[in-house]
Amino acid sequence: MSTDKPVFPKISGDELRFGIVAARYNNALVEALVKRVLETFKQHNVSALHVELKRVPGSAELPYMANMLASTGQFDCIVALGVIIAGDTIHDEVIAQSTAQALTAVGFSTEVPVINGILTTQTAEQAEERVNGKTDRGREFALAALEMARHKVDMIERLDELIGPDGDWSAD
């Protein structure tokens, strides 16, 4: 586990809109992640009216719902939350790798950033530490979402300035 956390800029989320997709598998841990994300959004002035939460059965279903939310064009960032704990087979590895690739693809195809908030651990104790311990990944996911949402909004404004009303690039 990396203990070298990024330093996040101070961002007000008062005009930003977020979609959260949360798996119900390992529900208590995922609920704790959701709670920390929502608390962090509130601390950064994100209105509860600007957050939509959707629940799906498990982490494998997160990319589909993230794609659907992003495709609406109503959100500045999507946060996908899940907890995958290793078992006796490699199923956890398959789900972790496929969801990571799919969530990245959602961001590229929709131009809406997607935060991969799926924890993958070897044990329940490791998951507990990352969710409810000093690591606090939920807060980190929310701060990453705030930063990426701000980047998205800023880049859309920049592109709008560069592209004229007729769709031609500015000569500037």
Image (tube, rainbow, N blue to C red):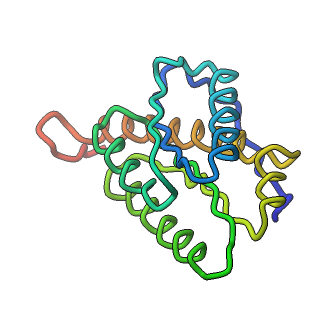
Residue 59 as seen in the image, left or right of residue 89: left
Residue pictured at 54% horizontal, 47% vertical? 24
Looking at this view, name the residue that lies furthest to the bottom.
89
- Spot occupied by residue 25 in the image (x, y as percentages of width and height): 57, 53
Residue pictured at 82% horizontal, 60% vertical? 126
Report the label total.
Answer: 0
Residue 5 as seen in the image, left or right of residue 102: right
Q: Is residue 127 above or below residue 31?
A: below
Q: Identify the image quadrant of the C terminus.
A: top left
- Spot occupied by residue 58 in the image (x, y as percentages of width and height): 50, 55
Looking at this view, name the residue that lies furthest to the front.
88
Residue pictured at 30% horizontal, 41% vertical? 162
- Spot occupied by residue 104 in the image (x, y as percentages of width and height): 45, 61
Q: Identify the image quadrant of the N terminus.
A: bottom right
Residue pictured at 80% horizontal, 52% vertical? 128
Residue 60 as seen in the image, left or right of residue 89: left
**Viewer-side residue, 100 vs 112:** 100
- Spot occupied by residue 73 in the image (x, y as percentages of width and height): 30, 37
